């Protein structure tokens, strides 16, 4: 086991003759430069797991790659935002959301990068650098010439903002707090200070400003040097890892155990050798090592070694990143070293043995194994060496399990897939055009995005709230053939590929279809499907179709390949009310999610007023009367009457019932308006128009827009 007995440095520095002078120098080095006296506090693993904001807190010096919480060194008050939703017959609800800006110190030495960030134990930033919640993030690497952060400078005033030179820190600007209960979450950061692993000797040499020199030493994936002294930081390593720290007369030299030992010849001994072996009553039966487990996202791990006969437990905390097998090997080594050290010896040797230093390994004549110099005392032309039996180097990494991994999967957010739809949905009672926004992401980690809408070709934009639940979006891989809307289409199938593995389609019975289930937009036609057969790789085959739903039978014959597919569900649609007078114009929508580049996620649609437009008339008929006139009739439909609960006429849904009828033929066009679903094409008019074949077209004139035309040929 490593032994840091450096109170004798003074005697060593001056040699046997100048011991008194050297002692004074050594005490200064020991107590002032390297190892201040009482009151030291060494590193604890909990120091790196809890985010603090107290004055006087110790900022760890990070080596390699570590997960640290840091210290909040600057923050603003919470920023409150208010939004109101509701209307159109629903009560208005005012919602409050909050964001905050703050800075967190991460390391008292420069760092090169920040990897993942956790907020309340959940991933806030993934390995690809994608944030799961909206914010602006900046890293200041900790250089001695770094400038103040612009946000802090703006808040504190010119010349008043600290630059925190020599301290690596992160700044969050307007971190949305809705996902964290409207409070600043506990943040932990994957901090990379040095590329790759870092040698223990290099760590000790930097911490001691060159007072500790090293030979080749083991490397650690990460280490956080905290505590309030250099000794505390170095001793935490040397107390667990098999290292020796000895004074060679010039510097303190750190080396790995298992090297060559110095043989002490019988002629060097000039006194009686004593040997003592402690009993087992005070020996530990268990040695445990707590550490940061690289296999568990740097969460705390524990490995232990046990031995029968001991009555106590030895526990050590190592603020370093290890694998489970390496930590198990260190625990076994620690326990073996403690039991080996219960055998001690005292040797009086000639002053020539003063070349030995505390921490050096020696071999004694007639004694097996190696011994470590624990204490060195200079007498009259003699040196008394207090020794403890040493063990060998630890075994290589052993087989060990890190335990159950509780980390959160890193699912990239990805860009938003956005659809802006003008659909004949709603209750038919509105007076403004309704548009519908469906959104989702191709990645499993996609979350909601903020929406902005424009109705003046992008000249101005207004907030439109956030997206709803993820919609099932995809592509129809083959064109649908034409089919009627009156019966089930049992001859057609449609193969659909969805945008994400998280999306799914399921079969529904006829009763559910009557209630509106499995409504989907394919191209411009609304259909319903009763059967959804999964084909694998996000593909489904849809069959048992109902076509031309809600008056879209006009689009049944206009399908092509690779049309958009959107499953229409109330909880996955955002309803937008376009301004009055915008009918015939264009609407644009932008989504701003954490995975979206500015302006990249957008969609547009011509405002046709599908929700304001009555559906086209149906069941056109022509009957010749006895005098040669034509009695033309039809059945109206209503945008407010899609269900048929009592078998009676659907409500009109318009201020008045009006129709425009157009009759055209060879060389003529005749137009008429009527207030009833019938019109008589008089025999005299037929004769004036030539009496040949005709085309009949009828539209219903709604309060805000006309229906699509229903047509019939005659003659």
Image (cartoon, rainbow, N blue to C red):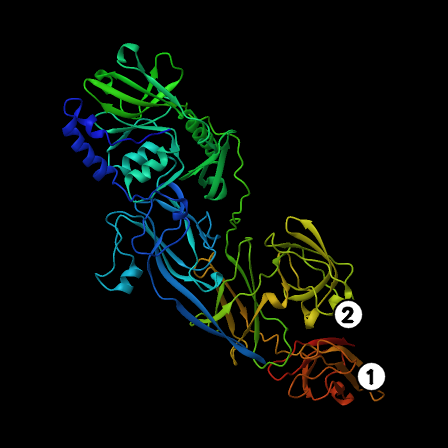
Q: Under tag 2, what secondary structure?
A: loop
429 above or below 571? below
Q: Position of residue 699 (x, y in %)?
A: 67, 80
User: What quarter of the picture does the C terminus occupy?
Assistant: bottom right
Residue at 25% x, 57% y is: 162
Q: Position of residue 476 (x, y in %)?
A: 64, 57
Q: Which sits in the foreground, 604 or 213?
A: 213
Whether residue 88 is visible: no
Q: Under tag 1, what secondary structure?
A: strand
Q: Which sits in the foreground, 37 or 166?
A: 37
Instruction: Tell me: 408 left or right of 565.
Output: left
Which of the labelled discs sits on residue 385, or is there none?
Answer: none
- For this orientation, the residue located farthest to the top is 267
Whether residue 314 is visible: yes
Instruction: Tell me: 97 left or right of 527.
Output: left
Q: Which one is in front in this view, the residue at disc 1 or the one at disc 2?
A: 2
Q: Which residue is mark 2?
A: 486
464 above or below 404? below
Q: Which residue is mark 1?
A: 624
Q: Earlier in the sequence, mark 1 or mark 2?
A: 2
Q: Position of residue 640 (x, y in %)?
A: 67, 79
Q: Residues within 10 Å of mark 1 (few under 14, many from 20)?
A: few
Q: Which sits in the foreground, 517 or 61?
A: 61
User: What quarter of the picture does the N terminus occupy?
Assistant: top left
Q: Residues within 10 Å of mark 2 (few under 14, many from 20)?
A: few
Disc 1 + disc 2, Cβ < 8 Å = no
Q: CA distance from mark 1 to mark 2?
A: 26 Å
- For this orientation, the residue located farthest to the right is 626
Q: Position of residue 140 (x, y in %)?
A: 32, 51
Instruction: Tell me: 607 left or right of 350.
Output: right
């Amino acid at each position: 086991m490593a032994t840091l007995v450096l109170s004798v440095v003074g005697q060593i520095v001056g040699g046997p003759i100048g011991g008194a002078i050297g002692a004074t120098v050594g005490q200064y080095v020991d107590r002032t430069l390297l190892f201040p006296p009482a009151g030291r506090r060494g590193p604890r693993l909990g120091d790196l797991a809890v985010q603090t904001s107290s004055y006087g807190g110790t900022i760890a010096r990070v080596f390699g790659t570590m997960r640290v919480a840091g210290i909040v060194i600057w923050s603003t008050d919470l920023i409150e935002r208010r939004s109101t939703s509701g209307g159109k017959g629903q009560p208005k609800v005012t919602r409050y959301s909050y964001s905050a800006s703050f800075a967190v110190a991460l390391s008292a030495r420069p760092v090169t990068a920040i990897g993942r960030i956790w907020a309340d134990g959940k991933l806030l930033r993934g390995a690809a650098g994608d944030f799961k919640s909206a914010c602006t993030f900046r890293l200041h690497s900790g250089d001695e010439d770094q400038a103040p952060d612009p946000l802090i400078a703006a808040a504190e005033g010119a010349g008043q903002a600290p630059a925190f030179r020599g301290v690596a820190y992160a700044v969050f600007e307007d971190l949305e707090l809705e996902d964290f209960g409207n409070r600043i979450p506990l943040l932990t950061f994957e901090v990379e200070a040095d590329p790759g692993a870092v040698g223990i000797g290099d760590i000790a040499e930097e911490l001691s400003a060159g007072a500790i020199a090293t030979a080749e030493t083991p490397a650690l994936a990460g280490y956080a040097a905290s505590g309030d002294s250099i000794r505390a930081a170095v001793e935490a390593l040397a107390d667990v890892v098999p290292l020796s720290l000895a004074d060679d007369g010039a510097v303190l030299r750190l080396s790995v155990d298992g090297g060559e030992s110095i043989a002490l010849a019988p002629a060097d001994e000039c006194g009686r050798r004593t040997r003592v072996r402690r009993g087992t009553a005070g020996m530990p039966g268990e040695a445990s090592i707590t550490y940061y487990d690289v296999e568990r996202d740097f969460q705390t791990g524990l490995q232990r070694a046990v031995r029968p006969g001991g009555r106590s437990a030895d526990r050590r905390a190592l603020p370093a990143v290890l694998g489970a097998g390496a930590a198990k090997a260190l625990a076994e080594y620690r326990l073996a070293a403690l039991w080996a050290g219960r055998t001690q010896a005292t040797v009086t040797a000639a002053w020539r043995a003063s070349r030995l230093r505390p921490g050096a390994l020696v071999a004694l004549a007639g004694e097996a194994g190696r011994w470590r110099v624990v204490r060195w005392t200079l007498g009259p032309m003699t040196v008394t060496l207090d020794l403890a039996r040493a063990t060998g180097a630890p075994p290589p990494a052993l087989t060990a399990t890190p335990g159950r991994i509780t980390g959160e999967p890193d699912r990239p957010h990805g860009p938003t897939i956005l659809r802006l739809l003008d659909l004949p949905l709603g209750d038919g009672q509105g007076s403004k055009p309704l548009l519908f926004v469906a959104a989702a992401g191709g990645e499993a980690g996609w979350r909601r995005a903020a929406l902005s809408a424009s109705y003046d070709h992008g000249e101005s934009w207004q907030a439109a709230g956030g997206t709803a639940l993820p919609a099932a979006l995809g592509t129809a891989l083959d064109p649908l053939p034409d089919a009627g809307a009156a019966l089930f289409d049992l001859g057609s199938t449609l193969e659909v590929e969805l945008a994400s593995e998280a999306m799914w389609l399921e079969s529904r019975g006829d009763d559910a279809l009557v209630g509106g289930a499995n409504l989907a937009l394919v191209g411009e036609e609304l259909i319903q499907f009763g059967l959804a057969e999964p084909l694998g790789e996000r593909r489904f085959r849809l069959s048992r179709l109902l076509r031309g739903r809600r008056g879209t039978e006009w689009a049944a014959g206009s399908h092509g390949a690779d049309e958009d597919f959107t499953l229409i569900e109330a909880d996955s649609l955002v309803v937008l009310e376009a301004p009055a007078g915008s009918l015939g114009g264009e609407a644009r929508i932008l989504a701003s999610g954490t995975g979206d580049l500015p302006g990249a996620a957008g969609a547009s649609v011509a405002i046709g007023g599908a929700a304001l437009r009555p559906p086209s008339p149906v069941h056109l008929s022509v009957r010749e009367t006895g005098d040669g006139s034509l009695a033309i009739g039809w059945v109206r439909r209503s945008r407010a009457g899609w269900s048929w609960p009592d078998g009676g006429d659907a409500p009109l849904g318009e201020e008045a019932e009006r129709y425009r009828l157009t009759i055209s033929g060879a060389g003529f066009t005749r137009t008429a308006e009527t207030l009833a679903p019938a019109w008589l094409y008089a025999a005299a008019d037929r004769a004036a128009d030539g009496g040949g074949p005709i085309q009949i077209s009828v539209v219903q004139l709604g309060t805000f827009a006309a229906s699509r035309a229903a047509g019939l040929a005659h003659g």
